[in-house]
Image (spheres, coloured by chain):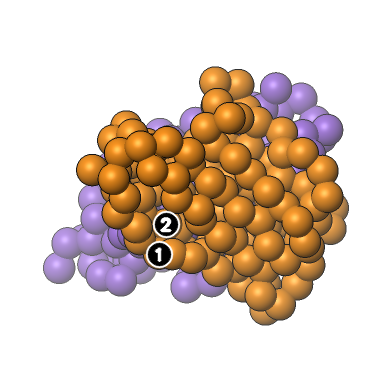
């Protein structure tokens, strides 16, 4: 079985500060990992994905994430937060014989203070 | 590329009526589409997996007779909420999978309010 845990349902940072959103996964097979962003009343937009290639993955809007198998983690970072980064962020895992299903974490709401 | 649309974006219906939500892949063919439900401030809950030309596979606890899913073509899946009740009010999101890729492309969601 696969699962995802996002540590911290709410993270608040100042504009220009480092953004760190934590994600730990559990998977009995090599995982595919994703980070999605959701703005209010909208669908999900893919930020980045890990598919067993490079462990450091760069995504859109300056975000990146590092796959660490030993720590079963896939934390999302951005060096400098912008006001426009305020949104809900979801980490998800897929893989194995799941028929392409995504298992989502609980989500982390990011607030950016001016 | 890889754009998924949903229609309508929001709908209000009266209790006891049925409402249909469409999910379309605009620029690719989707053999598999997924339907999710999201309550305020919560994560996405997978309701069912829809494969073109076959019956949908529902997640445990999801009433298949209440949430009818049809995937009649490679670009269209529909979710019909039958005999809607206020507790069915929610944000419904669909996604589409390209081939055997693990990546899903999400629609913008449909806000359903049942009065």
Residue B63 at least partly seen: yes
What label sits on residue A90 in the rendered view?
none
Q: Give the labeled residue for mark 2.
A: B110
Can marks 2 and 1 be said to lie on one chain? yes
Reply above or below: B104 against A72: below
- Give the purple chain's letter: A
| Secondary structure state at the residue bearing disc 1 | loop
According to the image, label 1 marks what residue? B9
Place residue B10 in its image quadrant: bottom left
**Which of the 4 quarters of the picture holds residue B72?**
bottom right
- The image quadrant where one finds the N terminus of chain A is top right
Residue A84 is situated, as x and y percent measured from the top left of the image, at 30, 71
2 and 1 marks in contact (CB < 8 Å): yes
On the image, the x and y values in percent for residue B108 come to: 47, 64
- Residue B46 appears in view: no
Vertical side of A3 occupied by A53: above or below? below
Q: Quadrant of the C terminus of chain A?
A: bottom left
Say which chain is orange.
Answer: B
Does A35 sit above or below residue B69?
A: below
Residue in view at x 77 percent, y 61 percent: B73
Task: Decide if residue A112 is on the left or right side of residue A46.
Answer: left
Residue beneath the point at 60% across and 30% down = B64
Query: Which residue lies most toward the left here?
Result: A114
- From the viewer's perspective, is residue A49 above or below residue A16? above
Q: Relative to B59, is A8 on the left or the right?
A: left
Q: Secondary structure at mark 2?
A: strand
Q: Quadrant of residue B74?
A: bottom right
Q: Residue at x 60, y 21 (%)?
A: B60
């Amino acid at each position: 079985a696969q699962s995802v845990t996002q540590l911290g349902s709410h993270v608040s940072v100042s504009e220009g500060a480092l953004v760190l959103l934590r994600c730990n996964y559990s998977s009995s097979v090599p995982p595919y990992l994703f980070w999605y962003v959701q703005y209010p009343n909208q669908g999900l937009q893919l930020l980045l994905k890990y598919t067993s290639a490079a462990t450091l993955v760069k995504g859109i809007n300056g975000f990146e994430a590092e796959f660490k198998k030993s720590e079963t983690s896939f934390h999302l970072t951005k060096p400098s937060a912008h006001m426009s980064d305020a949104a809900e962020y979801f980490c998800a895992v897929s893989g194995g014989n799941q028929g392409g299903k995504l298992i989502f974490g609980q989500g982390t709401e990011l607030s950016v203070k001016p | 590329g890889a754009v998924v649309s949903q229609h309508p974006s929001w709908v209000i219906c009266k209790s006891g009526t049925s409402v249909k939500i469409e999910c379309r892949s605009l620029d690719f063919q989707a053999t598999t589409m997924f339907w999710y439900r999201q309550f305020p401030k919560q994560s996405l809950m997978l309701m069912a997996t829809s494969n073109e030309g076959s019956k949908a596979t529902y997640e445990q606890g999801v009433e298949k007779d209440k949430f009818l899913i049809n995937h009649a073509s490679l670009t269209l899946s529909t979710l019909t909420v039958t005999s809607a009740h206020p507790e069915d009010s929610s944000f419904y999101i669909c996604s589409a999978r390209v081939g055997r890729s693990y990546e899903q492309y999400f629609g913008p969601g449909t806000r359903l309010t049942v009065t």
